[in-house]
């Protein structure tokens, strides 16, 4: 995806503060953090969203979640807990159309989703 900002970060065409990288994924600091720790973990290959995942991506998604767990431990936010968030599509509030997992923590987090009744 030539004009995808996260593909460009994965290919080092634009800079990001990288915390972890493997053959398949890269984790970097969110440019507009909403908490003391706000990291994005993405697949290096372009997948638009969870809605575009296939069965063969199961291992990749496992690697993304396990890397978030490891980063949380490395940054010493694991004991108090944190939030993992994936937005999907328009109603989910996804703004960047390259699948990404938010790792958010380092402080108590408010719930942004309210009951409908
Ligand atoms: P979404 O709303 O799609 O779940 O989250 C997109 C996230 O990407 C936002 O938290 C936003 O701050 C972050 N973001 C957007 N552009 C860039 C960028 O160029 N670099 C980095 N590091 N983060 C970005
Ligand atoms: Zn992309």
Image: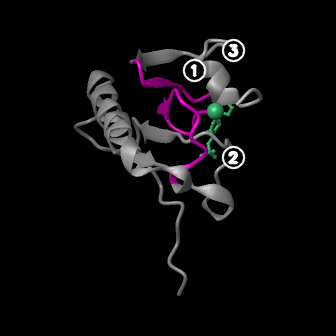
Disc 2 within 8 angstroms of ligand 1 (CB): yes
Mark 2 and mark 3: span between their CA atoms? 18 Å
* Mark 1 touches mark 2? (CB < 8 Å): no
Residue 19 horizontal side relative to residue 65, left or right:
right
Secondary structure beneath dot 1 equals: helix
Q: Which of marks 2 and 3 is nearer the N terminus?
A: 3
| Residue in view at x 69 percent, y 46 percent | 95
How many residues crowd around disc 2 within 10 Å: few (fewer than 14), some, or many (20 or more)? Answer: few
Please report the residue visible at 42 percent of the width from the left and 17 percent of the height from the top: 21
Mark seen at residue 95: 2
Residue 99 image point, x, y percent: 55, 42
The residue carrying mark 1 is 10
Q: In which quarter of the image is the N terminus?
A: top right
User: Is 15 situated above or below 8?
Assistant: above
Q: Which quadrant of the frame does ligand 2 lie within?
A: top right
Q: Which residue is drawn at 33% across and 34% down?
A: 63
Side (left or right) of 6 relative to 28 = right
The answer to whether residue 32 is seen in the rendering is: no
Q: How far across and down, in percent of the image, does residue 2 sit?
A: 75, 26
Neighbor class of circle 1 (other Cα within 10 Å; few <14, some 14-19, many 20+) is many
* Disc 3 residue: CB within 8 Å of ligand 1: yes
SS for callout 3 = loop
Q: What residue is shown with label 3?
A: 14
In the image, residue 65 sits, relative to residue 72, either above or below, namely below
**Residue 106 place in picture, x, y as percent:** 39, 35
């Amino acid at each position: 995806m030539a004009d995808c900002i996260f593909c460009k970060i994965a290919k080092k065409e634009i800079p990001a503060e990288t915390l972890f990288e493997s053959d398949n994924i890269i984790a970097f600091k969110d440019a507009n953090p909403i908490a003391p720790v706000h990291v994005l973990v993405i697949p290096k290959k372009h997948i638009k969203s969870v809605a575009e995942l296939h069965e063969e991506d199961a291992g990749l998604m496992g690697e993304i979640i396990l890397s978030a767990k490891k980063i949380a431990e490395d940054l010493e936010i694991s004991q108090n807990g944190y939030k993992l968030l994936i937005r999907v599509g328009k109603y989910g509030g996804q703004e960047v159309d390259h699948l990404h997992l938010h790792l958010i923590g380092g402080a108590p987090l408010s719930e942004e989703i309210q009951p409908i009744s």
